[in-house]
Image (spheres, rainbow, N blue to C red):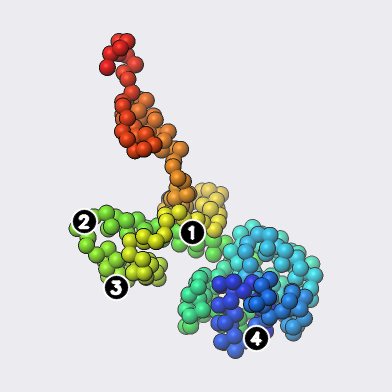
Amino acid sequence: MQLGLVGLGKMGSNMRTRIKAAGHEVVGYDPRPEVSDVKDLKELVAKLDAPRAVWLMVPAGEPTEENVKQLAELLEPGDVVIDGGNSKYTGDQPNADLLAKKKVGFIDCGVSGGVWGLENGYGLMAGGSKEDVAKVMPIFDALRPAGPRENGFVHVGPVGAGHYAKMVHNGIEYGLMHAYAEGYELLDAEPLIEDVTGTMKAWTQGTVVRSWLLDLLVRALEEDPGLAEISDYCTDSGEGRWTVEEAIRHAVPLNVISAALFARFASRQESSPALKAVSALRNQFGGHAVRDLSGKEVGETADPNAAPGAK
């Protein structure tokens, strides 16, 4: 099968390699000429035989929307576009509607696997019509992990369902990572634990907390003991926020995922205005000592009921 692949970054380039290794032809386009097979989308479409399949692996939002608009002008009835980026599910139906005017199909596909997907395969969550999904199934089979299809691929539902499933997947990822991180910090804080990395490595086989994420944390600790080479500043790419927004919409309590998201926000503060306010309040109502910007403890608040000049 032929596939047009737009976006040849870390994920896209590895996907191209894996799909080619399965015997398919891939025509890749990227704004960087050194990695691109064609000069633009027009040439990419021209190199594909009808019915065409074009897979987008570009950033969510405007880059995805712009590529869909261009493809809507270039593709023909019976072709299909797959958005494999981390787009918000609410943007999928507008993209599908735009392409439907030209009788071009649309699939939203959540893709999980990161930089390790080339070797291990990718977990795939597709949203769209059964007919469109069937057209691209050879590519899905090339990308997913070896073994039964249902263990690495799911047709979740109609347009939007694939990205919704991926959003929840990433929210769960936030919670899992933070739980491992908190466990690591507690182990590191206890003098009785002489081998923190070894303890966590011993958990990677046979225990109920074993997972690939735990494997990766152990790998990071072995490469950089104590994680001394990186800061505690932690970004987010949006999916955790969207997951929490959906929890609010559905009145579903996501205690762990929301806490993990807020912890990332806290990591970006050089100081916390909220905790400054708490410290000030403790000083005001209880006379508790506070610390100045140098870390020095300063005096307690005077008793408002004391006589003038009293200490």
Tell me the residue at 47%/83% (across/down).
147
Residue 259 vs residue 153, the one in the foreground: 259
Judged by depth in the image, the label closer to the viewer, 4 or 2, is 2
Q: Which residue is mark 1?
A: 171
Pointer 3: what residue?
Answer: 206
Q: Secondary structure at mark 2?
A: loop
> Which of the marked residues, 1 or 2, is nearer the chain's N terminus?
1
Q: Is residue 9 above or below residue 271?
A: below
> Mark 3 belongs to which amino acid?
Gly
Tell me if label 3 and label 2 are in contact, CB under 8 Å: no
Mark 4 and mark 1: Cα distance apart in space = 34 Å
Give the mark nearer the N terminus: 4 vs 1: 4
Query: Which mark is in front, 3 or 4?
Result: 4
Secondary structure under tag 3 reads: loop
| Disc 2: CA contacts within 10 A as few (<14), some (14-19) or many (>=20) | few
Q: Going by the image, does 31 lie left or right of 15?
A: right
Q: Secondary structure at mark 1?
A: helix
Q: CA distance from mark 4 to mark 2?
A: 57 Å
Q: Position of residue 165 (x, y in %)?
A: 54, 64
Q: Is residue 3 left or right of residue 77?
A: left
Q: Which residue is mark 2?
A: 191
Q: What is the spatial separation of the Cα atoms under label 3 and label 2, in whole angstroms? A: 26 Å
Find the distance from the CA under tag 1 to the CA under tag 2. Answer: 33 Å
- To which residue does mark 4 refer? 25
Element assignment for label 4: strand
